[in-house]
Image (spheres, rainbow, N blue to C red):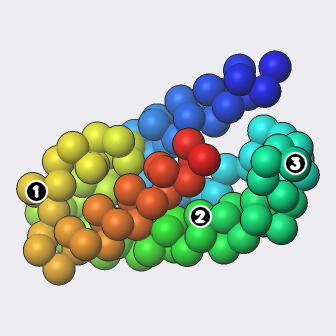
Amino acid sequence: TMHKAFLAVVLGVAFVGSSFAQNLELPKLPYEYNALEPAIDEATMKVHHLGHHMAYLNTLNAALTTLRQNETTKHLAKMGIDKLLQHLSEVPAELKGPVRNGGGGFVNHVLF
């Protein structure tokens, strides 16, 4: 069902990156862009997924790349996004905004 597919995507994002030092990827929607019509039209879904969601992801991945380049913050980049957001106080000041906003926006759009 759509509910099970949605749950699988959410749970998958929680664990992505937990032990790997690669960039996160834009998750594929578990349904077609027009599946929520008439409540949410296909164009709006594409804007949110391919535009907003991708922009948050790009911001987060840039921050993760910077974290990986420093021995003192490298461990943060290996956390899953859920855990990284819980450890935001350990993120250097110049990356807190990109991690909080990019990471939070990424997770929010997974839920959307």
Does residue 68 appear in the picture of this structure? Answer: no
Label 1, on which residue? Answer: 90
Q: Nearer the viewer, mark 1 or mark 2?
A: 2
Mark number for residue 37? Answer: 3
Establish if 81 lies above or below 71: above
Residue 66 or residue 9, whichever sits in front: 9
Amino acid bearing label 3: Glu
Q: Is residue 6 left or right of residue 33?
A: left
Residue 98 or residue 72, whichever sits in front: 98
Q: Is residue 24 left or right of residue 39?
A: left
- Kindly report the distance in space between the C-alpha atoms of the residues bearing marks 1 and 2: 25 Å
Looking at marks 2 and 3 on the same chain, the residue that comes earlier in the sequence is marked by 3
Residue 48 or residue 23, whichever sits in front: 48
Name the residue located 72 percent from the left edge and 70 percent from the top edge.
Answer: 47
Does residue 108 appear in the picture of this structure? Answer: yes
Amino acid bearing label 1: Glu
